[in-house]
Image (tube, rainbow, N blue to C red):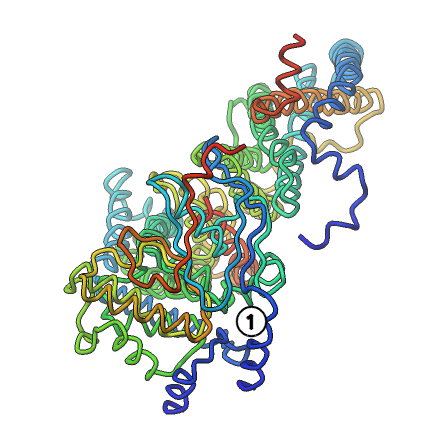
């Protein structure tokens, strides 16, 4: 079963980009955020969405992951419109929003166990693996309200390592994380890209991973209609 | 949505606000005429020529307002929920606008039915308000309308408001028969065999024919009110579209 | 299994969650477990609706009359109205904390059926409010001079009725979760829908007080519950998607 999946993925990766966005149009409060926005994302690519505050970065990410449906245009995943394969698309996607989705009264491990269940996994070793990836080993049993803001953010980031989803959509993932932590996380993004995954993110930090990085700037989109 | 193709073409024409604005403009004069004629005829016949009720005398004549408004209050809720569902499933803006336009008309019809019911109740029961099953159901229907309108105005984003309201209206529609049944049941439990409004054994033709005319007149009136509100809503939402601007320049 | 999990990770296979790991039942249980855990970490929230329940019931003797004959007559309705309001009061917070901290977005994006997650949350809500209210009801019955014969009917009707209240209330909570002033609005949306449950519930208590058979009433409450169980989660799920997308 798993071998078959791998080979399927491989062949698809070669022939066609994973994600294709065509003619995306979105308007909020009578202001056009973007119009005729289009791009593709292939395996191994990291796409940084840039733009000033209010240019629609978060809106774009929310549209891409399917939370917001206030848009016109087409989002295609593995050659098929997302609207016709929501479940499969959501299985292959991890989204990290502005709010990390971490419950303050639960411990890091309890938080992740719930997300693991949502992903359909019951394997506890995955949780310790994920906490190790974000540098939180030893903090498994500390309630999250006793962790710092950066550590809470890391609990959120740990979700990336719970699943095998190829597409990561990250909205300001490195907020409140220290320099060393950001460098470590960037290395993990690169690792994800090298394994055939792809990443879309917004961030105010200067990223070091220039080899993999491509950009899209939403400022240019404003007012083009 | 993938199941778009099996719907007839007019269905998609309806989806265009512009087409909808034009067609309602053409239909409206006819409906206005029909509403005026039917209501005038019904009122004249009902109030002046229909025979007085052998038990209630002339006070029963308020039936010619009470029954049509109660009918309408219920059918408008159904219209609203169905329009909401169409808007939800086919993402049709015009259907959202229809649903939104329905709510205030329906609420005012429910209020009219309650007020006329109270006025009728005074000579019949000697009290302005009696917990009669029909009146109670109508009051709850009014509450449902209030809920829909409150939710619609609380959400700022128009399309989110329309979708949320549609879900609420559909939930309400599923509940209306249950509410009606439970209230009827409650009523018989607490005051068995009281004198009921409108449930008269065999109303003579001279009495119900004007009533039928009034009901038809009220439906035409609803159609007019709905089209007026809808056209208003279309103009407001599409104010930046080219055709609306041209329209405004013409006038 | 564990070793294999790690190995697959190292191989670098990225497949998303495979079809095999769909376990609606285990998601339901995991959700209930998480909700209960959250509630027990904040025990004060757990007690508030119960105190409210007690207080509302206290207002009636003070506002009307402490006369046992009067209160006996009012008891079924008062206990039911108080239970209904206590449930309603606790409804607003059902999805709000998940909305505020971003968990709700994750729930919506999870590959698991939303129906199950939503059902899990509602069941947990009932375990934390409806069930304690039911267990506490006899106390209020005694305060309001409800005859001893009515206690069974009271508890059974609440046991069958409060889950329906939770299910309907959750629709209102889902529709208003994105709004700042959800509190009053939710009552406006939900109260009219509560009326059938109130009617059948109080009727069941009254029937059991007068010694009439209650099975019919309980069957009606059960039918409402069955209907709620099958339809309400759909409405809740749709409402949540709409609220989050706005």
Residue closest to the eye, C194 or A219:
A219
Rendering coords of residue B138 (x, y %): 57, 33
| Residue at x 74% of width, y 22% of height | B22
Q: Is residue C158 visible?
A: no
Q: Residue furthest front?
A: A211
| Residue at x 21% of width, y 62% of height | C43
Residue closest to the eye, C220 or B192:
C220
Q: Is residue A204 visible?
A: yes
Residue closest to the eye, A187 or B204:
A187
Rendered view: B190 above or below B230: below
Disc 1: which residue: A13
Q: Does residue C193 appear to the left or right of B39 in the view shown? A: left
Rendered view: A43 above or below A20: below
- Quarter of image, res B62: top right
Q: Residues within 10 Å of mark 1 (few under 14, many from 20)?
A: some
Q: Which image quadrant: the N terminus of chain C? A: bottom left
Rendering coords of residue C2 (x, y %): 37, 89
| Residue at x 44% of width, y 64% of height | A45
Q: Does residue A34 appear to the left or right of A210 in the view shown? A: right
Rendered view: C87 above or below B144: below
Rendering coords of residue C78 (x, y %): 36, 48
- Quarter of image, res A119: bottom left
Rendering coords of residue A18 (x, y %): 54, 65
């Amino acid at each position: 079963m798993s071998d078959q999946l791998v080979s399927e993925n491989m062949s698809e990766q070669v022939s066609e980009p994973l994600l294709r966005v065509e003619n995306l149009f979105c308007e909020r409060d009578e202001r056009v955020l973007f119009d005729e926005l289009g791009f593709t994302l292939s395996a191994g690519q990291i796409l940084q969405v840039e733009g000033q505050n209010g240019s629609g970065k978060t809106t774009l990410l929310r549209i891409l992951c399917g939370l917001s449906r206030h848009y016109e245009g087409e989002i295609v995943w593995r050659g098929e419109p997302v609207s016709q394969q929501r479940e499969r698309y959501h299985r292959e996607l991890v989204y990290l929003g502005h709010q990390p989705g971490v419950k303050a009264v639960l411990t890091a491990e309890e938080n992740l166990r719930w997300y693991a269940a949502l992903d359909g996994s019951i394997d506890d070793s995955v949780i310790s693996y994920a906490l190790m990836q974000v540098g939180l080993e030893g903090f498994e049993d500390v309630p999250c309200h006793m962790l710092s803001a950066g550590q809470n953010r890391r609990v959120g980031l740990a979700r990336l390592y719970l699943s095998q989803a190829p597409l990561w959509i990250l909205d300001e993932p490195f907020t409140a994380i220290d320099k060393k932590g950001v460098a470590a996380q960037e290395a993990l993004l690169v690792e994800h890209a090298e394994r055939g995954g792809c990443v879309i993110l917004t961030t105010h930090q200067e990223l070091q991973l220039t080899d993999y990085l491509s950009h899209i700037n939403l400022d240019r989109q404003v007012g083009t209609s | 949505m993938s199941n778009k193709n099996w719907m007839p073409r007019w269905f998609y024409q309806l989806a265009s606000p512009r087409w909808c604005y034009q067609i309602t403009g053409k239909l409206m004069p006819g409906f206005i005429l029909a509403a005026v004629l039917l209501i005038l005829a019904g009122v004249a016949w009902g109030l002046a020529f229909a025979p007085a009720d052998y038990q209630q005398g002339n006070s029963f004549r308020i039936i010619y307002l009470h029954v049509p408004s109660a009918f309408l209050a219920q059918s408008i809720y159904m219209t609203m929920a169905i329009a909401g569902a169409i808007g939800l499933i086919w993402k049709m803006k015009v259907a959202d606008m229809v649903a939104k336009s329905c709510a205030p008309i329906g609420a005012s019809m429910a209020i009219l039915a309650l007020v006329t019911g109270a006025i009728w109740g005074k000579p019949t029961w000697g009290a302005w308000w009696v917990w009669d099953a029909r009146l109670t159901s109508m009051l709850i229907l009014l509450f449902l309308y209030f809920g829909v309108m409150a939710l619609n105005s609380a959400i700022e984003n128009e399309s989110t408001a329309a979708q949320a309201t549609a879900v609420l209206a559909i939930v309400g529609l599923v509940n209306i028969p249950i509410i009606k049944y439970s209230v009827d049941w409650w009523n018989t439990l607490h005051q068995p065999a009281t004198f009921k409004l409108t449930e008269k054994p065999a109303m003579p033709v001279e009495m119900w024919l004007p009533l039928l005319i009034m009901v038809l007149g009220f439906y035409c009136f609803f159609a007019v009110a709905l089209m007026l509100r809808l056209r208003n809503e279309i103009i407001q939402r599409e104010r930046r579209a080219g055709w609306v601007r041209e329209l405004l320049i013409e006038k | 299994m564990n070793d294999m999990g790690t190995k697959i990770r190292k191989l670098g296979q990225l497949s998303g969650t495979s079809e095999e790991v769909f376990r609606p039942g285990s998601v339901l249980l995991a959700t209930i477990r998480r909700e209960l855990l959250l509630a027990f970490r904040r025990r004060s929230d757990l007690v508030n609706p119960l105190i409210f329940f007690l207080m509302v019931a206290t207002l009636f003797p003070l506002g009307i009359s402490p006369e046992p004959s009067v209160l006996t007559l009012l008891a079924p309705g008062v206990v039911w109205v108080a239970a209904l309001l206590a449930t309603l009061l606790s409804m607003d917070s059902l999805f709000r904390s998940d909305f505020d901290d971003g968990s709700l977005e994750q729930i919506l994006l999870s590959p698991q059926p939303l129906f199950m997650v939503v059902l899990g949350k509602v069941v947990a809500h009932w375990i934390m409010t409806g069930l304690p209210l039911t267990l506490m009801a006899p106390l209020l019955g005694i305060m309001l001079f409800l005859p001893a014969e009515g206690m069974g009917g009271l508890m059974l009707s609440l046991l069958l009725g409060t889950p329906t209240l939770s299910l309907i209330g959750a629709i209102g909570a889902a529709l208003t979760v994105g709004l700042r002033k959800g509190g009053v609005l939710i009552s406006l949306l939900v109260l009219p829908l509560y009326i059938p449950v109130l009617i059948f519930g109080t009727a069941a208590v009254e029937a059991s007080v007068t010694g009439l058979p209650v099975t019919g009433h309980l069957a009606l409450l059960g039918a409402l519950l069955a209907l709620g169980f099958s339809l309400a989660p759909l409405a809740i799920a749709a409402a949540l998607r709409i609220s989050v997308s706005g």
